[in-house]
Amino acid sequence: MSIEAGESAASRLGARLRRELGELLLPQRCIACSRFGAALHDGCVGLLTAAGGTRCTRCWRPGAGTWCERCAAGGTQAPAFDGLRAPFRFEGLARRAVLEAKFRRVTALLPPLAREAAASVPAEWTPEAVVPVPLHPARERRRGFNQAEHIARTVAEVLALPERTDLVRRVRETPPQATLDAVRRERNLGDAFAAHGPVPPRLLLVDDVTTTGATLGAVAATLRAAGAEQVWALALARED
Ligand SMILES: [Zn+2]
Ligand SMILES: [Zn+2]
């Protein structure tokens, strides 16, 4: 064995030992049932609060049957996406899962939630590709990853579609939406995104959480301006 091969074998062994030791010290424990074996068991996803009740079938706002007033009014009142679904309410365990994934990098929490989100896609939606909402490159460098990209990867696998991270970029760093009221949220996002064509006609946008739908709407509008004909939106959780 050459010295080089010996060194790389030793460093692989070192990495494996560190990983296995890490798992021994920090075994994954389900945030829903507290049993060991997974960050969140697939079977425990049902313990999270569903975004149930009567909802606008377009923007997923609670309260209204079929379409809410804003969606029915159309024009600039209505969101730029053709439909939105989010299987969970952003509270309790769902909120904790999303925040721990985002800020503590427990990304193992995301696939079970993303599979549930993929299962909530209505049969009449016919996207050709899955597009994660992009982070600004500077923010992605600071955080180390884009949570929406992880979610979109699982959604794309379940729906047997390609994940496209090349179609839209975030060109302006904006204050986090959570720090702003509804009117400022809309303004905050003006020109924040830029499409990079050619853009397929039918797309499914993916993000972790949605509140007013402003971010998903802004990305959908950008993709439409670049030639997309139908854009649907999917999030793990909705803040009602
Ligand atoms: Zn569990
Ligand atoms: Zn609506």
Image: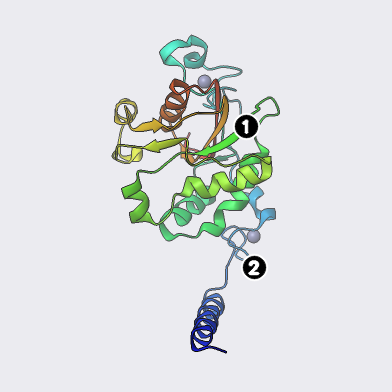
Q: Quickly name the residue at label 2.
A: 37
Question: Pointer 1: residues within 10 angstroms few (<14), some, or many (20+)?
Answer: some
Displayed quadrant of residue 17: bottom right
Quadrant of picture, ligand 1: bottom right
Three-letter code, disc 2: Gly
Which residue is at the front of the view, 148 or 26?
148
Three-letter code, disc 1: Glu
Q: Position of residue 88 (x, y in %)?
A: 57, 41
For residue 194, above or below residue 225: below
Respond yes or no on whether mark 2 lies under 8 Å from ligand 1: yes
Q: Position of residue 130 (x, y in %)?
A: 57, 37
Q: Quickly name the residue at label 1.
A: 128
**Residue 38 placement, left or right of 17:** right
> Does dot 2 land on a helix, a strand or a loop?
loop
Displayed quadrant of residue 83: top right
**Residue 67 placement, left or right of 77:** right
**Measuring 49% from the left and 45% from the top, which residue is drawn there?**
148
Which residue is at the front of the view, 197 or 191?
197
Displayed quadrant of residue 143: bottom left
Q: CA distance from mark 1 to mark 2?
A: 35 Å
> Does dot 1 land on a helix, a strand or a loop?
loop
Q: How is the image coloured?
A: rainbow
